[in-house]
Image (cartoon, coloured by chain):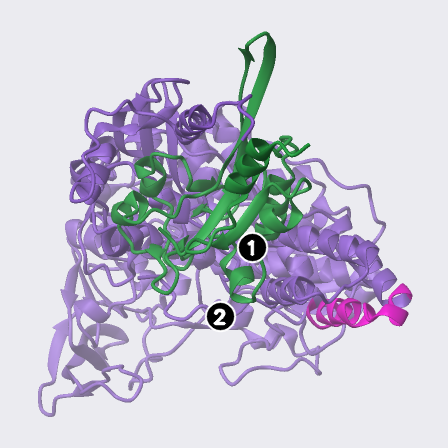
């Protein structure tokens, strides 16, 4: 895994898809590819109420990524310094093998350039000390971009608050 | 791999890239101007891709001017200025891209013209008409040809076909029979009454006088008459056609063919004045009184060069080829003698020799001072002459005409050797001392080249002539040194081909039209125009490979030695249609070789054997072999800059085709959930092999990216079930 941790606080997410818009705008993508995507699961009945979950699906930046292994040209790479998995467009020839190999559907097809595009945690922004576009523009602040070694214990804190019942 | 070692930079494309990168870097910081800038980029892309129309330049300029004028306060005007400057410097080139849908420096790839079209002196849209012949649309094929050449039938029979020497199919096996398909289409269309003139523009009320009814003069007459000018042609002979009529023998070009195509010009109202010789029967002064607005000098090159050997002028039996062919063409079918020597190795020499055979001369010998390889005559011509019994004496030069009592008895010749190649690579013939011998003949026909008869133009004293005694013109416009006088054909080029004369005549017609309409003349030479963009035929790789160029059926040898019947009998219908299907469509595929490069060097699959894409042809071509290794990944298609290589899902198959030639087709697997096409089993095997060391994926249900993501998202949400308060 990369040394970063992109955490979605599912409880806060309202499925507004701002992250997708921010991502596509930042990468200048045409209709079609969704480098990150919020997928609505449900609605289904929980007790007597219909409930839906909004799952944020970026790339997981696997430890030993199948897309990198599948790529015959070396375009799909894992960055040494932080483990970000990215595609080098100079090398990508558009054979789509990474798309077929990935079990999560992370690499996407960009028909405008005939190459694959995928989540790279907005490497260029990260290198400038910024956060990925999706995180920066998230309206409910449900997306968090953190160092994997020191994540903020959001769920732990919330659980602790619920248990304390000081109210 | 690409044909051109170094692609030149096209200013149109360069302008687009520069403006785009300035835009990307924030060159237009105000949203409204940025929007206009993006609109300009879209319009420039239209020009680069051959989709632009007349309004494009106006719109681009007006947007750029608005950006320049209104954007001064916020740093936008620089971008607009750059755009306006580029357009004003390269306006001619921008407009030529729009008009011709052709990029002369072959940098705008989708506009790169086919080599055959670029090789044609008349710039005919070859892939266009060949495809139409393949589709059985002969009348449309003729219509396409006649936009650039009003003589499809004549050229279909006698053109020297420079196009076929450039034909890319020639690197695979043999070139497409581009020449004859023209004649086939024209013959069909005429016979079915579907060979028609395009509509004529309204009368302009201006008159043009053309001197000479040869291919150049007639071509100019045709295009000028179509534009609505009144055209009068003066011709010293009693019939139209010039060298086509009195130079080219009837066994190559029947008179009816010329007459039919000339009749199309008469139908447009072109006036012919036959048996009217400039300088003898009429003068320029007299013609000026008739109020002609412009003149075109297309007098040809009808004077033979002399051999410059002693006693050449002493005998009536020394007849130059031009006189000889002319008198035969005009009906004199008596044999000039029994034994003939034809001096020279060009097409005229072949014509004279083969004509002599037909007239009943017993022994016809061509004397040429170089070897078979250096002969400028067409290969087919030489071969057919040999078949008809013409003898050849190579490495031999005439030194003296020998005779007595006023009659030729022999031609004294000398042996020659070829020197070492000089700086230009040409090997000069050098005479071998003491090797003289006598060739017993009673007629000598020199055919060593022609010159322009300058005498008839003496009256135009300001006319400037080249060192070779041809009329000097500006190449792009055929304007001579005298205002209002244009020139074309052999009179400008020296003795050349019918198709070169046609090209010159067409250029002259366009320039005369501009001259009389007050439009400035271009500086750049004209570029061939893409007349049409037709879809490709679908054909299997083995059919594409196995179709062979048909041999031209010829009249039997004995009859060829006796009559002037047409020698080449033409293809039958199915042969012609099949021949058209061999075309590789170089108007679409620009032979950049990117597909092969991707497949071989990047995917490391090496399925494509397309050696013909490389100009030096050092690699083999086998279209059928693709299917052996191809996994249908589509990388070649994704990297094809022109859409020549396409991958398509149809039925339950994925099909890879290059310009319609099906290179590979395989059954595809589908997404287990939504049924989307995923790719053939071999493609998935390829991926599995790549990731096998880290993952065992076999047995997994095949899913498309969307369904894979959905399934993963669903699993994720189970881990944190909705409704639990954490």
User: The disc numbered 1 marks a residue on which chain?
Assistant: B
User: Where does residue B160 sit, x and y in percent of width and height?
Assistant: 37, 55
User: Where does residue B216 sit, x and y in percent of width and height?
Assistant: 57, 58
Name the residue rendered at 32%, 75% in the picture.
B315
Query: Picture quarter containing residue B577?
Result: top left
Magenta span of residues: B70-90
| Chain letter for the part of the structure drawn in green | A
Does the segment drawn in magenta span residue B79?
yes
Estimate how packed mark 2 is, as few (under 14), some (14 to 19) or many (20 or more) residues with alpha carbons within 10 Å.
Answer: few
SS assignment at label 1:
loop
- Judging by the rendered image, the residue that carries numbered circle 1 is B102
Whether residue A96 can be seen here: yes
Task: Spot the residue most to the front.
Answer: A166
Q: Is residue B411 above or below residue B599?
A: below
Dot 2 or dot 1: first in sequence order is 2
- Badge nearest the viewer, 2 or 1: 2
- Judging by the rendered image, the residue that carries numbered circle 2 is B8
Name the residue rendered at 66%, 36% in the picture.
B198
Does residue A112 appear left or right of residue A3 in this picture? right
């Amino acid at each position: 895994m990369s040394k970063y941790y992109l955490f979605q606080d599912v409880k806060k997410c309202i499925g507004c898809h701002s992250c997708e818009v921010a991502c596509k705008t930042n990468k200048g993508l045409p209709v079609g590819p969704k480098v990150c995507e919020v997928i609505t699961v449900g609605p289904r009945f929980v007790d007597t109420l219909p409930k839906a979950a909004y799952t944020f699906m970026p790339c997981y930046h696997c430890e030993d990524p199948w897309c990198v292994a599948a790529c015959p040209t070396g375009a799909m790479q894992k960055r040494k310094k932080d483990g970000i998995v990215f595609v080098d467009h100079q090398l990508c020839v558009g054979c789509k093998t990474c798309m077929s190999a990935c079990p999560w559907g992370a690499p996407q097809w960009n028909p405008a350039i005939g190459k694959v595009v995928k989540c790279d945690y907005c490497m260029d922004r990260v290198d400038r000390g910024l956060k990925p576009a999706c995180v920066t523009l998230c309206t409910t602040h449900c997306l968090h971009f953190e160092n994997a070694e020191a994540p903020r214990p959001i769920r732990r804190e919330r659980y602790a608050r619920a248990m304390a019942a000081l109210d | 791999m690409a044909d051109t070692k170094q692609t030149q930079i096209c200013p149109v494309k360069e302008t687009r890239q520069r403006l785009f990168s300035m835009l990307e870097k924030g060159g237009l910081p105000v949203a409204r101007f940025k929007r206009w800038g993006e609109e300009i980029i879209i319009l420039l892309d239209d020009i680069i891709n051959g989709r632009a129309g007349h309004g494009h330049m106006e719109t681009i300029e007006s947007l750029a001017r608005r950006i320049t004028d209104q954007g001064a306060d916020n740093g936008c005007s620089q971008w607009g200025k750059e755009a306006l400057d580029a357009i004003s410097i390269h306006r001619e080139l921008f407009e030529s891209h729009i008009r011709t849908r052709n990029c002369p420096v072959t940098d705008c790839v989708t506009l790169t013209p086919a080599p055959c079209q670029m090789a044609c002196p008349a710039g005919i849209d070859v892939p266009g008409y060949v495809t139409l012949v393949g589709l059985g649309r002969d009348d449309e094929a003729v219509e396409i040809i006649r936009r650039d050449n009003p003589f499809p039938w004549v050229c279909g029979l006698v053109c020297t076909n420079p196009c076929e020497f450039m034909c890319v199919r020639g690197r695979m096996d043999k070139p497409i029979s581009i020449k004859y398909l023209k004649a086939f289409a024209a013959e069909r269309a005429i016979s079915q009454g579907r060979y028609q003139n395009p509509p004529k523009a309204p009368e302009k009320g201006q008159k043009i006088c053309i001197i000479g009814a040869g291919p150049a003069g007639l071509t100019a007459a045709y295009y000028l008459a179509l534009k609505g000018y009144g055209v009068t042609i003066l011709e010293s002979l009693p019939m139209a056609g010039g060298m086509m009529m009195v130079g080219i023998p009837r066994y190559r070009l029947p008179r009816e063919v010329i007459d039919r195509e000339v009749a199309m010009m008469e139908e447009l109202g072109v006036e012919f004045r036959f048996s009217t010789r400039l300088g003898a029967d009429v003068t320029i002064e007299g013609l000026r009184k008739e109020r002609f607005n412009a003149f075109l000098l297309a007098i040809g090159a009808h004077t033979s060069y002399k051999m410059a050997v002693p006693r050449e002028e002493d005998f009536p039996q020394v007849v130059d080829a031009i006189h000889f062919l002319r008198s035969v063409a005009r009906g004199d079918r008596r044999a000039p003698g029994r034994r003939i020597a034809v001096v020279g190795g060009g097409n005229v020499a072949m014509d004279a020799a083969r004509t002599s055979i037909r007239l009943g001369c017993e022994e016809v010998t061509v004397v040429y001072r170089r070897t078979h390889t250096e002969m400028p005559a067409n290969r087919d011509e030489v071969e057919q002459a040999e078949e008809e019994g013409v003898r050849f004496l190579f490495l031999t030069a005439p030194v003296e005409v020998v005779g007595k009592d006023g009659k030729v008895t022999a031609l004294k010749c000398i042996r020659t050797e070829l020197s070492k190649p000089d700086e230009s690579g040409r090997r000069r013939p050098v005479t071998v001392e003491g090797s003289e011998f006598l060739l017993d003949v009673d007629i000598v026909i020199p055919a060593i080249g022609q010159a322009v008869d300058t005498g008839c133009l003496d009256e135009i004293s300001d006319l400037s002539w080249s060192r070779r005694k041809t009329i000097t013109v500006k190449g792009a416009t055929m304007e001579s040194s005298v205002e209002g006088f244009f020139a074309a054909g052999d009179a400008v080029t020296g003795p050349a081909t019918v198709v070169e004369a046609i090209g010159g005549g067409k250029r002259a017609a366009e320039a005369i039209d501009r001259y009389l309409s007050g439009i400035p003349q271009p500086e750049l030479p004209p570029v061939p125009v893409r007349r049409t963009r037709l879809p490709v035929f679908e054909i299997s790789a083995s059919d594409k490979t196995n179709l062979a160029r048909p041999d031209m059926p010829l009249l039997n040898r004995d009859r060829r030695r006796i009559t002037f019947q047409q020698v080449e009998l033409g293809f039958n219908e199915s042969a012609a249609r099949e021949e058209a299907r061999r075309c590789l469509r170089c108007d679409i595929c620009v032979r950049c070789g990117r597909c092969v490069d991707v497949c071989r060097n990047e995917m490391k699959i090496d399925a494509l054997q397309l050696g013909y894409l490389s100009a030096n042809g050092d690699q083999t071509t086998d279209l059928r072999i693709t299917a052996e290794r191809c996994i249908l990944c589509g990388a070649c298609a994704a990297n094809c800059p022109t859409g020549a290589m396409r991958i398509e899902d149809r039925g339950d198959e994925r099909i890879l085709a290059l310009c319609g030639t099906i290179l590979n087709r395989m059954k595809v697997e589908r997404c287990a959930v939504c049924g989307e096409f995923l790719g053939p089993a071999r493609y998935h095997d390829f991926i599995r092999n790549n990731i096998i060391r880290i993952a065992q994926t076999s047995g997994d249900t095949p899913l498309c990216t969307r369904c894979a993501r959905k399934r993963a998202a669903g699993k994720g949400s189970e881990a944190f079930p909705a409704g639990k308060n954490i």
